[in-house]
Image (cartoon, helix red, strand yellow):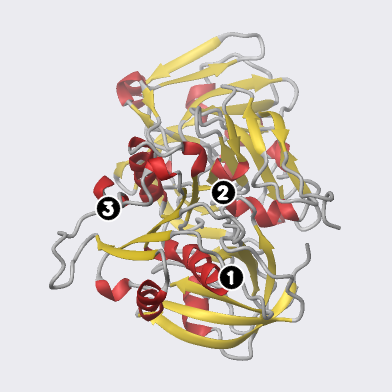
Amino acid sequence: MVTTPHDPGSAHLDGNVLAGPLRELFAVDMTSARTECVGCGQRAAVAELETYLGGPGVVARCPGCHAAVLRYVRTPSTAYLDLRGTLTMTVPMPAGGAES
Amino acid sequence: MRWQLARLVDAHPETATARTLTLELDSWPGALPGQHVDLRLTAEDGYSTQRSYSLAEVGDSGRVRLTIQRLADGEVSPFLADELAIGDEIELRGPVGGWFVWDPADTDPVLLVAGGSGVVPLMAMLRARRSSDSKAPFRLVYSVRQQADVYYAEELGEIAATGRDVETVIVYSRVAPPGIARSAQRVMAADLQAPGWEAGNGPRCYVCGSTGFVESVTQALVHLGHDPQRIRTERFGPSGG
Amino acid sequence: MAITRGFRGRRLDADVELPPGQYLTQDFPVLSAGPTPRIDRDSWEFTITTEAGATHSWAWQQLLALPQDKPTVDIHCVTKWSKLGTAWQGVSLDVLLEQVESTADYALVHSHGGYTTNLPVQDLLDGQAWLVHQYDGEDLPPEHGGPVRLLVPHLYLWKSAKWVNGIQLLEQDEPGFWETLGYHEYGDPWREQRYAGD
């Protein structure tokens, strides 16, 4: 009774656009990190998540089951990162460790 | 990573609806082709908004280049495409992104597929190849609606004419110019096949354009046997209201 | 933050008073946090669940058979646009809640796709909230929340849940999708309650 096809209006972009916001929080690039979806177990790079930017915050969804795996809001004083849809995150590290 | 001020030192029209900006930075660590920067614009009353733009040139000299496509109903792109003047300063953060990048030390063949303004980060890869001593075979398939929409037309012609193992192909989706046999249509599987860049050659594929474009090209590449693990994608588009 | 010379954003000069920090827009921006569901009217259903666990449901034809209101209201999105004089048609929440036995103080609104938002029950009553199914004389299109969305225009628009399918009445407040992520639990635009703590 409810279908959720890909929006013909292409309402989403992808997680590449999260590089700047996440680099504000983390010492390394997080768009190459692989997430594991709580709902369906699919692994995807953050860069590959279906990312909706228009609303009050950013919602990045699993390309397999469309569940929210990462949500992010930046207010003037606080960054909120919600990863309840993510089971694990695997982060490639640059040789020699994180940049300063 | 901090915001810093970038100064507009050069601007020229790329097409009737796009402008290439050269921005100068006091501190720029260099970048990998495919990376992008975030720009932050702030109005006098404190209203502020930010956007992400791919580098068209990675800027080893402390100068970076962006090409801004004016979106008809855009909030930021008309300002950047029409109003920002030489000498004006704008806040910039970057380079950022580590997924949709090409490493000039990598020797594998590379297949680039661009839709419209999605050519920008792929151009950064072509330029980086040229300015390094890379011999990686490169092929660009660049889809535009019509001839007038082609970015970097002269330079692309030059790269194709002078580079060894570099091919650039422009395909037209709406109006093909006279003398082009291929009828105007979107990128098809046949456009993505060429000796040297077949699935069996194991190229790295970079696909950039609108969400619809990226999804249809990716599907076609997978269908042709390309390893999904070697296809990297970046979706361009308006970021919403 | 450094001022960008000449940058004004999308704002028009408004000759009416708007909530602080808002700008006027003529179009109707579509903001989405997920794919737009296509919901068949014939299988649409809306359910109110009370704090005691009792449920009351309405199907599409039952909603249409209830008394219809035609509110014309100003709407204010927390992303800073406001739109004036928007015309809707739907059923007042007073009509629906009248049929429900509850003393709960809080409501958690649910939508297709898992979206939620919370607000006091008091803000759903006294002609302040509607389930709307028409906008500007036409069926409410999916991108604006059709077939049916909640309309609570005196709060920021994220409270006016699109694709609404239920309201849970609760004795204790439970934060929704954006309220768990830094947005204000109440969201009064005139007091600029954008973020938690505002």
Location of residue B117 in the rendering, given as x and y in whole percent from the top left corner: 42, 65
The quarter of the rendered structure image containing the N terminus of chain C is: bottom right
Q: Amino acid at mark 1?
A: Ser
* Residue B132 circle label: 1
**Residue sticking out furthest to the right:** A100
The answer to whether marks 1 and 2 sit on the same chain is: no
Q: Secondary structure at mark 1?
A: loop
For this rendering, which residue is in front, A30 or C122?
A: A30
What residue is rendered at 73% in x and 20% in y?
C171
Viewer-nearest of labels 3 and 2?
A: 3
Mark yes or no: residue C147 visible. Answer: yes
Q: Amino acid at mark 2?
A: Gly
On what subunit does the disc labeled 3 rest? B
**Residue sticking out furthest to the bottom:** B87
What residue is rendered at 38% in x and 29% in y?
C67
Residue highlighted by disc 3: B191
* Residue A55 circle label: 2
Q: Secondary structure at mark 3?
A: helix
Decide: is A6 above or below A38: below
Please tell me how crowded label 3 is: few (under 14), some (14-19), or many (20+) other residues with Cα within 10 Å.
Answer: some
What residue is rendered at 63% in x and 48% in y?
A57
- The image quarter containing residue B71 is bottom left
On what subunit does the disc labeled 2 rest? A
State the CA–CA distance, disc 3 to disc 2. Answer: 37 Å
Q: Amino acid at mark 3?
A: Asp
State the CA–CA distance, disc 3 to disc 1. Answer: 28 Å
Location of residue A16 in the rendering, given as x and y in whole percent from the top left corner: 58, 51
Q: Secondary structure at mark 2?
A: loop
For this rendering, which residue is in front, C182 or B137?
A: B137
Whether label 3 touches label 2, CB < 8 Å: no
The answer to whether marks 3 and 1 sit on the same chain is: yes
Q: Residue A15 vs residue C171: left or right?
A: left
